[in-house]
Structure formats: C-alpha cells, structure tokens
Image: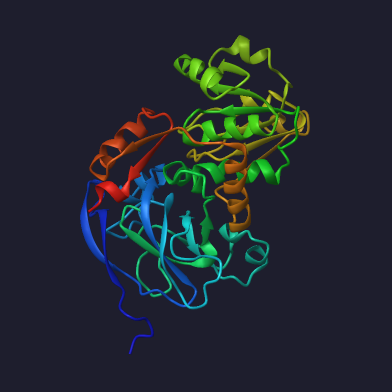
Amino acid sequence: MSFFQEGKDCLGWAARDASGVLSPYHFKRRAIGADDISVKITHCGICYGDVVYTRNKHEDSKYPVVPGHEIAGIVQEVGSNVHRFKIGDPVGVGTYINSCRNCDECNEGLEVQCPNGMVPTINAVDVDGTITKGGYSTFIVVHERYCYKIPENYPLALAAPLLCSGITVYTPMIHHKMNQPGKSLGVIGLGGLGHMAVKFGKAFGLNVTVFSTSISKKEEALNVLGADKFVVSTDEEEMKTLSRSLDFIIDSASGDHPFDPYMSLLKTNGLFVMVCYPKEVKLDPLSLFIGMRSITGSFTGGTKLTQEMLEFCAANKIYPEIEVIPIEYAYEAFERMLKGDVKYRFVIDIQNSLK
C-alpha cells in the first residue's frame, strides 16, 4: 500500500515532445502533507529554463513537461504542522521545491547548493516518485520551507519574476558584497536578469554601466532603468576608455561571447560573475593574472536570501519590468523571448486565463 494519499486534480499546460508546443493537460498533484501548503497560482513568470525543458535542450526532459518556476499565488490549504503560513497569504515558489535539509548547505539556508539532491520545480523526481510539474498550472503543493512570504503591498504579477531572475542576480551581489555605495558595477546584457541587476545596483548605491551589442537599448537603460552609462560592447575604442574602471561585472548575456574584453575593464581584485549559460568559457589566463582578477558563477539562491530579497524589493519599491500575457500566448512568448523581444519578463496571468 502506498504511503502517499491520492492527490487532487490539477489543470496545467504541458509540452508533450521536443517541439515545445503547449496545450491543456490534466494531472494530479500529490496530497497535501503535514508540512505542505497548497498554493492557488495567480501568476507565473516565463524563464529561458521553460524553453530548455519543454524543448529537451538538455536531452533529459520527462514528458509531459509542465514548465514554470517563477510562481506567485495565494495559500488555499495548509498542513497540520504548518505555522509560517495561513490560508489567504500571498506566497511565492521558486526554482526548487525540496532538498535534503540535513547538509551544511541546507543548514546555512543555501538549499539550492544541496549536494544530496536539490529537487527542481520542473522535470525532477518529487518525494512521492512523480515528476515535478511547474507553475503553468492552477495550483501547486510544496513543503512550507520552499515557499516565500510575498509582502502584502507587493503585486503578485511583479513578484513572480523575482523568484528566478531576481534572486539569480541578488544572490551573487550580496554574497560578494556588491552592496557598497560608491562602487562600480558593469552589467552585460539587458534582459530579464540584466535589468534586475541594474535595478539592484542602483538601489545599493552603485555606479552602473550597461554593456550591450544593441544601441537600441541605450535609452531604456539610461532613462527607464536608471543606469549611469551605456556602452556598445562592439565599440573597441569606447571599451578601452573603461579599462580598469569597474569593481564588479555581472554577465547575464545569452549566447556565446568573448570574456577577455570585459575582464580588462576590472580594477585590481575585480570580480566577474557569470549568471549566464554559454556553451563554453574561454579566456586568456593573463586576464586573471593581471590585476589579480577573479571569475565565478552563481545561479538562483537559498531560501533565506530569497525571502530577504522579496522584503528588500518591497521596502525599496523595486519592481521588474513585465509584460502580462494569457496562457494561450505562452509559446509565442517563448519565440519572442528567444529573439530578445520582451521588456523584460513575460508573466502569465494564470488566474484569469487558465480555467
């Protein structure tokens, strides 16, 4: 006899094969456990990870795939041991929904780095043996540890992208102490992640320079997002004028691109942080030796820092720039996102379009 009780019916949108085409899909969520909460999903952000799993980019997709790991909604049910949440609370769910809870990383609130098996919100094996299914659905059941309180005054549609794009840049900024007023930050790429790096950088009191291959993003970077300087990265002469001028660089650019030209812009002891996912990283060792520069990587963040970020955004009125769409438009949104045709994050209005 199975230990797990039969769950409740859920409606989602899923991809059935590597075409990535989405269509309605009925499935069962696991029954709520003593430490779980059930979240009625109101909004879900669209991330490049949704394309990866629906189109089998890593060749490990477990179809049908229900994407979505930038989830915002309202608590509709709580388990008997839950004390942090009550019915009616606004909450978020991010890129993972479980971890071992016993290792050093978990004990430090770095569950995303759990070496014993962090369980992603999409396309992974859940505690009951089923495959995790994400936020393109009407509700989700999650252990309370992996849910976050969304401040009451923060709109749910705007909170959703923070659970991936927001925390992905906030984590290295806090970990590497970029929140020092007066320091200088370079941001490579101006998409879902890059625009949040600019917003956090300005909130921290940094002097922010945006690097892009497209001059068309200049006005938006300076006048909407508040960057201090905009540089077309293919302009070699302008790039040279910034040599040894930056304390930090966050690289959020999609696709393959050179690294050495950017490394030369760092001051002595400068830090280059990758939150992008190129096929390979190639650079001249001299880019590290000269100036004792460092390069590192980061992705999403632990539960402690995620909650802190949400509260920081609410307190400082930091909001992602979004375009709200119905679920029926999701596949077209994928195509537009791949072309860079979004400012700067799509958010699906689940509550009004998935019925």
Residue 275 vertical placement versus 86 (above, below): above
Q: How is the image coloured?
A: rainbow
Quadrant location of the C terminus in the rendered image: bottom left
Residue 218 vertical placement versus 48 (above, below): above
Quadrant location of the N terminus in the rendered image: bottom left
Q: Position of residue 268 (x, y in %)?
A: 79, 29
- Residue 349 appears in the picture as rendered: yes
**Closer to the camera in the image, 6 or 148:** 148
Q: Residue at x 73, y 21 (%)?
A: 245
Q: Position of residue 12 (x, y in %)?
A: 27, 56
Q: Position of residue 342 (x, y in %)?
A: 38, 30
Q: Residue at x 58, y 63 (%)?
A: 114
Check the image and name the residue furthest to the bottom: 1
Task: Please count the marks in the image.
Answer: 0
- Residue 123 appears in the picture as rendered: no
**Closer to the camera in the image, 234 or 196:** 196
Q: Is residue 36 left or right of residue 202?
A: left
Q: Residue at x 35, y 70 (%)?
A: 130
Q: Is residue 111 left or right of residue 323?
A: right
Check the image and name the residue furthest to the top: 237
Q: Position of residue 316 (x, y in %)?
A: 62, 37
Residue 101 vertical placement versus 52 (above, below): below
Residue 238 vertical placement versus 20 (above, below): above
